[in-house]
Image: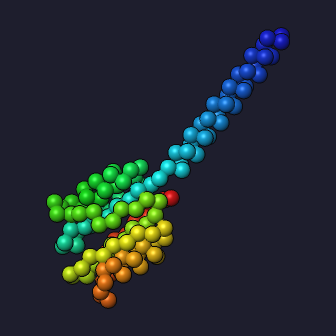
Amino acid sequence: MRLFSKLTQASGLAVVAIAAVQMLSATAASAEDMYGAISTDEEGQWGYTYNYPTRAQAEASSLKECGKDDCVVRVWFKNACGAVAENNKVIGWGWSASEAEAKAQAISSCGSGDCKITTWACTER
């Protein structure tokens, strides 16, 4: 009887240990950095991505979304927001922890009073 009781206790502890490891793994996975990027061409075509596990993946995906050979990555961001502003001649971009600040930086870097936000994105972290 005692052997059965000790085996039952050991099994119960093993289940608790496995559950704890799974919870820690899920927490670590949710704490990973998230990347985003915005690409544009000179004619106003754009592509944006967010919540990618690496900068390279976010940039490659934004270029693909942009869809033209002359698209370039204008801004990438990690656990933040990115924005692009344009007028007919100038492109500006920015990034920040907040959407509003990323947009303000994009307008400021565009440098012209008639620049407008054309696209923006934020990661979930």
- Residue at the left extreme? 69
Q: Is residue 124 visible?
A: yes
Residue 108, position as x, y percentages in the image: 36, 81
56 relative to 122, above or below: above
Residue 22, position as x, y percentages in the image: 59, 36
Residue 48, position as x, y percentages in the image: 33, 62
- The quadrant where residue 113 appears: bottom left
- The quadrant where residue 121 appears: bottom left
85 relative to 6, above or below: below
Display coloring? rainbow
Query: Residue at point 31% right, 84% down?
Result: 111
Looking at the rendering, in which quadrant would you find the N terminus?
A: top right
Q: Is residue 117 visible?
A: no
In this image, 105 relative to 10: left or right? left
In this image, 106 relative to 29: left or right? left
- Residue at the bottom extreme? 113
Query: Residue at point 56% right, 40% down?
Result: 25
Number of on-image labels: 0
- Residue at the right extreme? 2
- The quadrant where residue 78 appears: bottom left
Residue 45, position as x, y percentages in the image: 23, 69
Query: Residue at point 22% right, 73% down?
Result: 44
Q: Nearer the viewer, residue 54 or 30?
A: 54
In this image, 49 relative to 100: left or right? left
Query: Residue at point 61% right, 35% down?
Result: 21
